[in-house]
Amino acid sequence: MKIRKFKSPLTWTALFSLVTVSAFAAQGAQGSAMSDEDFYNEEVVSATSIYDPFEGMNRYTFEFNDYVYMKVLQPIVDGYTAITPDPVETGASNFFRNLKYPVRLVGNLLQGRMQGAWVETGRFVVNSTVGVAGIMTPADSINGLAPIKPEDIGQALGSWGIGEGPYLVLPLLGPSNLRDLGGMIGDRAVNPLKEPFSLIDDWRWESHLALSGTEFIVKSPDILERYKQFKGSAIDPYSSMKNGFTQYRRGAIAE
């Protein structure tokens, strides 16, 4: 299975996107030049500086999530990638990313990023029309409408100076913190796809389950592949994930 570019909206389709593979990959590259013990010690020193008062419960949830990812999600991903041609996979991924335009727009507006809001709006208009509902991305080749890093409400809250709070591992949704949990709920409020697994609706199944389920399957191969790469190089996956996620989010907010 080929490796694809990572995308990161903070919603159900980001089941693993909060794993923040880019941070983990950087750590893995550095770790190859040192012993496993040195790499582990470096991970632990960084991770212990993160406020984690619920570590016992978080570790239990992490293990539960890992079991679901490997034993439940992996067979689904294998079947999807085996029967779906690459162009269809790419088109489906583009389609769902295009639908998340409101989340990225609000994330930019709340931070006063007018240029970012303009680019996201222009891309949405062009890709939704010329690109046939976002299946294709002709905006990529238009001057001034090249893809930009996505913004979300959690990033906006961080830019306002709101602290990240305690580190959390959410069932199925993965790593987070108190601030990003609030941002996730905000993202959901403006998200046109109200995912069936809701943090505020008592896990209610909604009428558009089929569409959300399709989106979940479409996005899973990219993120699961990176999750496995990270897990395979870490002696203590929990601490490494905690550190990688936190550093990734801090970096996204600082940009």
Image: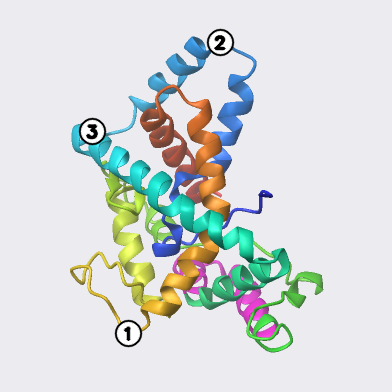
Query: Which of labels 1 and 3 is toward the front?
Result: 1
Alpha carbons under labels 3 and 2: distance apart: 26 Å
**Magenta segment, which residues?**
103-126
Question: Around disc 2, counting alpha carbons within 10 Å, would you say few (fewer than 14), some (14 to 19), or many (20 or more)?
Answer: few
**Looking at the image, is mark 1 or mark 3 earlier in the sequence?**
3
- Are the residues flagged by discs 3 and 2 in contact, CB closer than 8 Å? no
Q: Main secondary structure of the magenta part?
A: helix
Alpha carbons under labels 1 and 3: distance apart: 36 Å
Look at the picture and state if 196 lies above or below 157.
below
Look at the picture and state if 24 lies above or below 49.
below
Residue located beneath label 3 in the image: 55
Residue located beneath label 1 in the image: 207
Amino acid type, residue under disc 2 in the picture? Ser
Q: Which residue reaches farthest bottom?
A: 129
Disc 3 element: helix
In-image side of 13 versus 133 (left or right): left
Q: Is residue 193 visible?
A: no
Q: How is the image coloured?
A: rainbow
Residue located beneath label 2 in the image: 35
Q: Camera-side residue: 145 or 113?
A: 145
Question: Around disc 3, counting alpha carbons within 10 Å, would you say few (fewer than 14), some (14 to 19), or many (20 or more)?
Answer: some
Look at the picture and state if 17 lies above or below 56.
below
Who's the residue at 65% across and 62% down the image?
Answer: 148
Amino acid type, residue under disc 1 in the picture? Ser
Instruction: Name the spot of residue 119 as percent of width and height, x first.
Output: 65, 73
**Looking at the image, is mark 3 or mark 2 earlier in the sequence?**
2
Instruction: Name the spot of residue 120 as percent of width and height, x first.
Output: 61, 73
Amino acid type, residue under disc 3 in the picture? Glu
| Residue 28 in which image quadrant | top right
Q: How many marks?
A: 3
- Are the residues flagged by discs 1 and 3 in contact, CB closer than 8 Å? no
